[in-house]
Amino acid sequence: MTSTIAPAPTTREPAGAPRATPGRRGRTASRIRSVIKHVLLIACSLLMIYPLLWMLISSFRPTNTIFRTPGLWLHDATLANYGHGWHALSPTFGHYLINSGIVVLGAIIGNVMSCSLAAYAFARLKFRGRTLWFTIMLLSIMLPIHVVVVPQYIIFNNLGWVNTFIPLILPKFLATDAFFVFLAVQFIRGIPKDLDEAARIDGCGHWGTFSRVILPLMVPAIATTVIFTFIWTWGDFFTALIYLTSPEKYTTPIALRQFLDATSGSDWGAMFAMSIVSLLPVFLIFLFGQRYLIKGIATTGIK
Amino acid sequence: MSAISELTSLRRSRAKTADERRQQRKENSRDNKAGYLFLLPWLIGLVVITIGPMCASLYLSFTDYNLLQPPKWAGLANFQQMLHDQRLHQSLKVTFIYVFVGVPLQLALALAIAILLDKGMKGLSFYRSIFYLPSMLGGSVAIAVLWRQIFGTDGLVNQVLRLIGIDSHTGWVSDPRYALGTIIILHIWTFGSPMVIFLAGLRQIPVMYYEAAAVDGASRWSRFSRITMPLLSPIVFFNLVLQIIGAFQSFTQAFVVSGGSGGPSDSTLFYTLYLYNRGFANLQMGYASAMAWLLLVIIGGFTAINFFVSKYWVFYDD
């Protein structure tokens, strides 16, 4: 099991594709099999994606028709749900999107800086206790957040930071998302050491080697970090639920939940509209960053 | 290489002679200062955000603490109370059902689809995107909201059932018999990320094994059971470990679908949901800490069992 950043071209070839016997019967059989497979896969894709499409279409329907229209056709499209949903809470929905944006931006900067620094140490520097720290780092990936959340809350509460964005952002500057440290370590290990040595001969210290050689080469790993951080922080519900208490500090997921409670599920049109608005950034990131996402999970084996 | 195989290989390489160790120590001292400087943010985080709070939480689990008055030592009282706490037992039951039904089904589906896909086929990246998308969105509040509608009394599921002639008025999320099932379905729906890991693993299997098997006239099934499965088993293993750890911590879906209560009649009272209610709604921080440590012990226990059992079915090709 080696790193899968670049699968060797020879192993790309199908696993277990039977080179069917050349006769006509064999070819027909394999064609039929392939058709069946595609039909199966398309049916499965449709089933997977249907709820999403239906939510999207329904968000343009008057609420009273959502409950009677399981199909995807759209008779009288309306934007009323979006207008209504946007202004349903005070402050308006745009405010929560901006809050989410601030938290996400902070988290991204924090993760990229702190995780790449730690990763350089683990991947390239030899220091006493490295194996021990590295093991602790790997274990901390699997630590349930609930074990630390109560004392963390107490600490942030005593510092007067509850109902600010600090508890959501500060930990990222301290590389607590060890997953990204591991991701970057894996990546740096794949960079030829000759480059470090060349830099050293040219007079670079560790900082120079890191900032001028490793960091520029790490762009794909950084992109993966940015994208994952974006998606996870944008959707993070638990931490925001605990730390953000007043409506003007709410991030998007909390606002959505609040909206659901306030309307007790009666205004599905507006609910769907705002759900779509909250999913849109993630969807766009998915669309344009998929390559990095897939590389990221394939390299580290963590979702 | 995954985090887990990394851990396993660390354990293997630990055995070294004293001489080698001395040699290594001498070399190691070279970058000591730089190493710790680069590691500084992470080390501070480890102490302040992770290990410190872990110890504090262990201490708090032996106390009564409501955030307002200082913690009062309570000995084992919290743990004794847990023994008799019916809602806690219910939450354990719900969580175990979720983990031991949801995770295997999700992984089985992920593996099945990955094997269907991995034949150098047309449209691979299209299918992969479609299947992967739900796992990107599945953890969000928006999808939980959608689920609440889909499985509601007048939701999409019942509308479709009526279309095909079944006059269903079951509120799937409001009926204690089915509510947990809808959340398990949501979990299975997000099979895309383990699928992508399986796909990457399948590509690592050298074609020559299959060619050799074909020459020997191996059947489709024996190629799968003798080549694909053994070589993929480490990946199945770490997916299993990580998915179990993750599933024990599920929170958002149950919280949103049940409106924060874990209802109807505690049928979706996930462990973490109950922990949240005890700690942050009732401000019983001591009890919540005790619950958190029980969770850690449970997760650690299952991970250990997983590692132990893995000796019998996981095959390392090195």
Image (cartoon, rainbow, N blue to C red):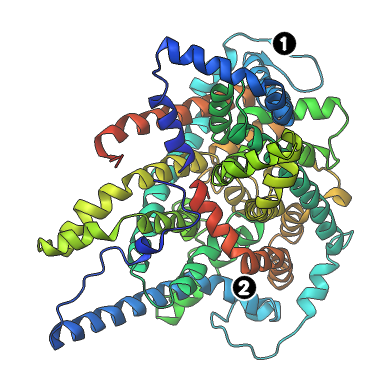
Q: Residue A188 in the image: x percent, y percent?
A: 59, 43
Q: Secondary structure at mark 2?
A: helix
Figure quadrant of the C terminus of chain B: top left
Neighbor class of circle 2 (other Cα within 10 Å; few <14, some 14-19, many 20+) is many
Q: Is residue A268 left or right of residue B122?
A: right
Query: Closer to the camera, B177 or A15?
Result: A15
Amino acid type of the residue tagged 2 in the rendering: Met
2 vs 1, front mark: 2
Label 2 vs label 1: CA separation? 50 Å
The residue sitting at 86% across, 41% down in the picture is A164
Query: Farthest residue toward the front?
Result: A201
Q: Same chain, marks 2 and 1?
A: no
Image coordinates of residue B259 in percent, x first then y, are 65, 51
Which residue is most to the left? Answer: B217
Chain bearing tag 1 is B
Q: Residue at x 58, y 37 (%)?
A: B272
Q: At 48% from the left edge and 64% from the top edge, which residue is drawn?
A: B170
A294 over A143 or under it: above or below: below
What residue is disc 2 on?
A55
| Chain on which label 2 sits | A
> In this view of the protein, which residue sits in the foreground, B74 or A240?
A240
Q: Decide: marks 2, 1 in contact (CB < 8 A)?
A: no
Q: How many marks?
A: 2
Residue A192 falls left or right of residue B89: right
Measured as percent of width and height from the top left, residue B38 is found at 72, 31
Which image quarter is the N terminus of chain B in? top left
Q: Is residue A4 left or right of residue A203?
A: left
User: In the rendering, which numbered label is found on residue B72?
Assistant: 1
Q: Quadrant of residue A116?
A: top right
